[in-house]
Amino acid sequence: MITKYEFRKGKTIVRQGTHGTSAFIIEKGKVEVFRTDDKGNKTVLGVLKEKEFFGEMGLIAGWQRTASVVALEDCVVGVLTRETFLTLPPTHPAVIAIKKIMVERLKTVPDWLKKKG
């Protein structure tokens, strides 16, 4: 159902601008989420740790990745594909968790994402 991958410190897990159809859950370690603007300036959006998700917009909407994610330390990350997600019942813990995350993140949608439309 969820495939686990290991990423060494410094490795890119998700690259901004690439097509995405999976969400990720951190099972071990920490990652940095950041955006790079057209001039190459990096803006850190946050640091995520164990049991936190990222990539949910790609999973739900199939959008291009809006940020990059890099391992801050050695990590184990579970990957939930769109195919698998669509087979899960609404009461599955992963479905409930992703819905909660989406509601919270959509409350604070930045201007650059609103323009994506």
Image: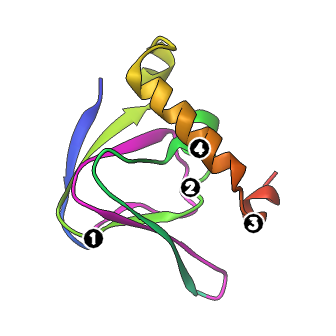
Q: Quick one: label 1 or label 2, which is nearer the N terminus?
A: 2
Give residue 32's position: percent from left, percent from top. Answer: 39, 68
Judged by depth in the image, the label closer to the viewer, 1 or 2, is 1
Residue 78: quarter of image: top left
Q: Is residue 24 magenta?
A: yes
Q: Nearer the viewer, residue 108 or 11?
A: 108
Q: Looking at numbered disc 3 in the image, what kind of residue is underneath it?
A: Trp
Residue located beneath label 4 in the image: 57
Res. 49 visible in picture:
yes
**Separation (CA) of disc 3 from disc 1:** 25 Å
Q: How is the image coloured?
A: rainbow
Which of the image's four quarters has the N terminus?
top left
- On screen, residue 47 above or below 49: below
Relative to 1, 86 lies left or right: right
Q: Residues within 10 Å of mark 3 (few under 14, many from 20)?
A: few
Residue located beneath label 1 in the image: 72
Residue located beneath label 3 in the image: 112
Give residue 82's position: percent from left, percent from top. Answer: 49, 29
Judged by depth in the image, the label closer to the viewer, 4 or 2, is 4
**Magenta segment range?**
11-39
Q: Quick one: label 4 or label 2, which is nearer the N terminus?
A: 4
Relative to 88, 111 lies left or right: right
Res. 62 visible in picture:
no
